Image (spheres, helix red, strand yellow):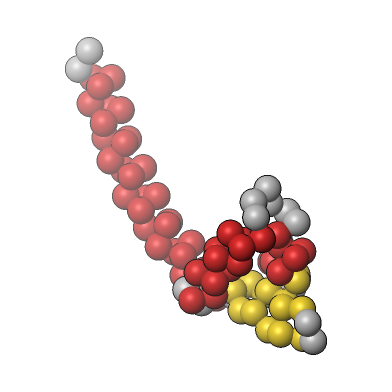
Amino acid sequence: MLAKGPLTLNGVASNFEMARPSVSKHVRILRECGLISVKRQGRERYCTARLRGLREVAQWANYYRVFWDKKLGALKRFVEENP
């Protein structure tokens, strides 16, 4: 959602079926991890994606995707060759 543009905390919360304090807790964790930023404008807090941080997460996940693809491919070959 935030990749499309900033949203208020209420705007983010309206997309989930959980209490606002729970959403706030998730937002706080994402902010602490550097994946989003939160800026206060008047009474509202606007959340914005920090895509550089998300790229780092994607690179990390891709490393393990390649790793597990190789391992599971080898297991599949083994099972097919040894009925």
Q: Which x, y percent locates residue 14?
A: 75, 56
Q: Locate residue 60 relative to residue 26 in the image: left or right.
A: left
In the image, residue 78 above or below residue 66: above
Q: Which x, y percent locates residue 35?
A: 54, 72
In the image, residue 73 above or below residue 54: above
Q: Is residue 4 visible?
A: no
Q: Which x, y percent locates residue 24?
A: 61, 67
Depth order, front residue of 39/1: 39
Q: Residue at the location (73% across, 54% down)?
A: 15
Query: The C terminus appears in which quarter of the rendering?
Result: top left
Quadrant of res 62: bottom left
Q: Which x, y percent locates residue 61?
A: 42, 57
Toward the left, the furthest residue is: 82
Quadrant of res 73: top left
Depth order, front residue of 25/30: 25
In the image, residue 26 above or below residue 15: below
Q: Is residue 36 visible?
A: yes
Quadrant of res 47: bottom right
